[in-house]
Image (spheres, rainbow, N blue to C red):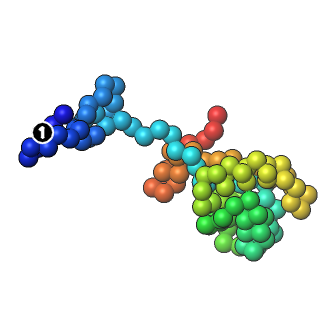
Amino acid sequence: MHQEAGRDRPPHPSSRRSGGGAAGGVRKAGKRASRILYVRNLPFDVAEDAQQMYAIFGAHGVVRQIRAGMASVAQTRGTAYVVYESARDARRAVEKLSGFNVADRYLVLSLMNYDDEYAQRRGQPRTQPE
């Protein structure tokens, strides 16, 4: 224990060193759960209708943002990013909406991993799943 001004107290957590961690004894954070879904196979008219998109995805959790992938100014690509309030809501949406039929098209959903989210914020190309 450290002694400071006559008091016994445990060492501060940042003063502890652990083997195998990054420099300075700080460990890297584990993989984060994603709040962002990548949605494919959306009917073009649905992807353009924000109210309908929020109705579909909002039924499974609190949606913070939906961004439709645009092929041009006038037409969507049938893809979208859906950002949920929590990772739990995002996982629930994947479970409930994968394969969901919307206007005779079956939705394909995937959770983005943290590295993809970071690359997207930085404007870098995302990694492609193998």
Q: Position of residue 20 (x, y in %)?
A: 34, 25
Q: Image quadrant of residue 55?
A: bottom right
Circle 1 Cα neighbour tier, 10 Å, few/some/many (<14 / 14–19 / ≥20): few
Q: Residue at x 61, y 52 (%)?
A: 87
Work out whether residue 124 can be spotted.
Answer: no
Q: Residue at x 66, y 64 (%)?
A: 62
Residue ID for mark 1 = 3
Work out whether residue 30 can be spotted.
Answer: yes
Q: Residue at x 73, y 69 (%)?
A: 54
Under circle 1, the secondary element is strand
Quadrant of the drawing holding the C terminus: top right
Q: Position of residue 86 (x, y in %)?
A: 60, 56
Q: Image quadrant of residue 10?
A: top left
Q: Nearer the viewer, residue 5 or 63?
A: 5
107 with respect to 63 (left or right): right
Quadrant of the drawing holding the N terminus: top left
Number of marks in the rendered image: 1
45 with respect to 61 (left or right): right
| Residue that lies at the very extreme toward the left in this rendered image | 5
Amino acid of disc 1: Gln
Q: Is residue 14 above or below residue 98?
A: above
Q: Position of residue 94 (x, y in %)?
A: 73, 49
38 with respect to 114 (left or right): right
Q: Nearer the viewer, residue 104 or 28?
A: 28
Q: Is residue 60 above or below residue 10?
A: below
